[in-house]
Amino acid sequence: MHANSRTIATQQRGPHEDLARRVSRALNAPWRKPVAAHTQAAFDNAQAWLRERDRPLILDSGCGVGLSTRRLAAQFPEHVVIGVDRSAERLAREYGAPPDNALLVRADLVDFWRLALRAGWQPARHYLLYPNPYPKASHLKMRWHGHPVFPALAGLGGEFEARSNWRLYLEELALALAQATGREARLESFTPPEEGLTPFERKYHASGQTLWRLTVTLAHRPHLLPTPP
């Protein structure tokens, strides 16, 4: 397969100068955004599905078309895998029915992560694969590590792995995780198998782009997400 994906274009040359302040704010200022009704209903369904299965959980956040969810379920047959994406159109792409140990959920991660943390979910593994990089410096608050929900992501714990074709995104994520949890992440380039874990991974690799992987073991720390009084 040959592809011609464009590389990330940005004027930002290093970790954002406002990153530490935004992480500190997220860790200390309760966020009062109400949970959307559709995500609450989706989470309740996922919670019921999970309770019926006595297996370790893998969370595939931002799963897109769900191909990664299916492949992770095949790779870890003794686990259950829940893939979450906010796009009904992406989740409806035809890749065959998910295996019995996988569930695809349409929900907003901003709400889903908070609900999972409150419900005591402790994923054994948590994947964040090729998140939207929002490469403009002015869009830091839209990257997960610059968003108010970041403490929920960090607090869920587990063997956390993020992948991107933009090293700077993962450098910032590593800094944010270290600030929030004290854990130092490993950041390295890697070569995926030809089929890739996601369609983006396959496309970027076929275009000759360097792919990056961040890995870190995180403790379950629900207290990281401040709650309103």
Image: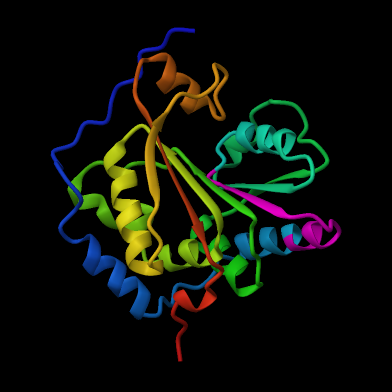
Q: Does 125 appear above or below 4?
A: below
Residue 28 appears in which quarter of the rendering? bottom left
Please indicate, yes or no, whether residue 13 appears anywhere in the rendered image.
yes
Residue furthest to the bottom: 229
78 with respect to 39 (left or right): right
Q: Residue 60 lies in magenta, yes or no?
A: yes
> Which residue does the image show at 59% across and 33% down from the upper left?
65
Q: Does 198 appear above or below 119?
A: above
> Which residue does the image show at 67% across and 32% down from the upper left?
71
Q: Residue 5 lies in magenta, yes or no?
A: no
Is residue 140 or residue 38 the one in the foreground? 140
Residue furthest to the right: 52
Percent across and percent down for residue 144 are: 38, 54
> Which residue does the image show at 27% across and 31% down from the upper left?
8
Q: How many numbered discs sit on the rendered protein?
A: 0
Residue 181 appears in which quarter of the rendering? bottom left
Please provide the residue range marked out in magenta: 47-62
Please indicate, yes or no, whether residue 134 appears anywhere in the rendered image.
no
Is residue 45 or residue 200 the one in the foreground? 200
Residue 29 appears in which quarter of the rendering? bottom left
> Which residue does the image show at 26% across and 42% down from the upper left?
168
Percent across and percent down for residue 120 are: 65, 72
Percent across and percent down for residue 136 are: 21, 43
